[in-house]
Image (spheres, rainbow, N blue to C red):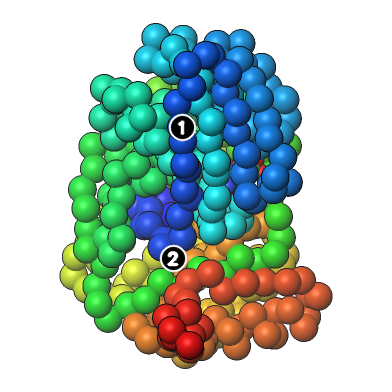
Amino acid sequence: MNLIGEHTDHSDGFVLPVLIPQETRVELEPRRDRVVRVTSANVEAGTWHEHELGSEEPTGTWTDHVRGVTRILAREGLLDRGFVARVSSDVPLGAGLASSAALAVALLRAIRQAFALDLDDVALARVAQRAEREMAGANVGIMDQMAASVGALGEALFLDCRSLAYQRVPLPDAMELVVVDSGVVHRHGSGGYNERRAQCEEAARLLGVAALRDVTAADLPRIGSLREPLARRARHVVSENERVLEAVHALRAGDVPGLGELLDASHRSLRDDFEVSTEEVDLLVGLVREQEAVHGARITGGGFGGSIVAVADAGEGHHAAALAVAEYEQRTGLDAKVLLPPHVLEALAGNDPL
Ligand code: ADP
Ligand code: MG
């Protein structure tokens, strides 16, 4: 889940994702032939899908995420045998929490282990990203895959999406992250994601730089001379990159209110300049933000629905989110879910041997 640095990855910028405790599991058994058989407990459970290694074509189903991975491994000569794989996940699908990257990274780890592939964690993330680009129709950046491949619980991953250099930044004990699924389902391939990305590339071309990463706040007058909506799109990316750097400082200083302000500013920028929020998500962000224990909130993920992230005082997050969700559901008729933090009583109940 991305704490801050939204829609900066495809402009070679900075991002600050954190891991959530939900995970995707892949059980894999190698075969002697080149047949790949997969099933997922999360999509049409019990249905098996089959393809031949090396002749992968997009099908428009979830298995494109698998086909993309096997196509690249086959092409690079890293894999010459098929396998049987069972997927299951408690990451919500399509909620802006990178279930697609979790699937690709989990699958690649299983393949790496089963076939003793020589592939480090960064190389693995790159294969996962290319797989999604080639087969799932989403021109995604590398953040989700890097977070899933090298991130660890309890820390944020400060990542430079150009060099893939990263630093681990511990999360302060005084704060708690809140994640709520708005119940508005987003779709990468058909949504405005690829359009936004193309607009950022166009803005960079007009500004004469390789990517918007190369533009700073000092260039704002030049950005302002771009035609709309390119100016707004570029302004978001440039200001968001700076917010990531400030958020890293805030985390290191244990400045929770300061971090909250950065999240608020990020949401305004995503809503007004990048235009990837929705009315419902704006409402949810507003309601969560009204809670006393909450210091800041914003939409997270690709946008057009999905989840929101907020920063709250430790121990207060679930209660605050539950109050906001009750009001949100009443006003929209949508079904929202508090994904993080888990409810204390639920967590205890889950551990109760009775
Ligand atoms: P996000 O990554 O934000 O969850 P995406 O649209 O990028 O949303 O990816 C969601 C898609 O990834 C699903 O529609 C499905 O095709 C695939 N996917 C992710 N996790 C699983 C899973 N456990 N089983 C089957 N397909 C999955
Ligand atoms: Mg995804």
Q: Which residue is mark 2?
A: 263
Question: Which residue is rendered at x = 48% and y = 88% of the image?
Answer: 354
Q: Is residue 268 depicted above or below 56 in this figure?
A: below
Q: Which mark is residue 38?
A: none
Q: Residues within 10 Å of mark 1 (few under 14, many from 20)?
A: some
Q: Would you name the residue on which mark 1 appears?
A: 29
Residue 62 lies, in percent from the top left, at 66, 37
Instruction: State how far apart marks 2 and 1 are (Cα).
Output: 43 Å
Mark 2 vs mark 1: in front? 1
Q: Nearer the viewer, residue 179 or 265?
A: 179
Q: Residue at x 62, y 44 (%)?
A: 40
**Residue drawn 57% across and 23% down?**
36
| Left or right: residue 49 compared with residue 260 | right
Instruction: Please tell me whether residue 118 is drawn above or below residue 157 in the rendered image.
Output: above
Left or right: where 133 falls relative to 328: left
Quadrant assignment for the N terminus: bottom left
Image mark count: 2
Q: Is residue 143 left or right of residue 268?
A: left
Report helix, strand or loop for mark 2.
Answer: helix
Is residue 329 visible in the rendered image? The answer is: yes
- Residue 211 position, x and y percent, is 42, 28
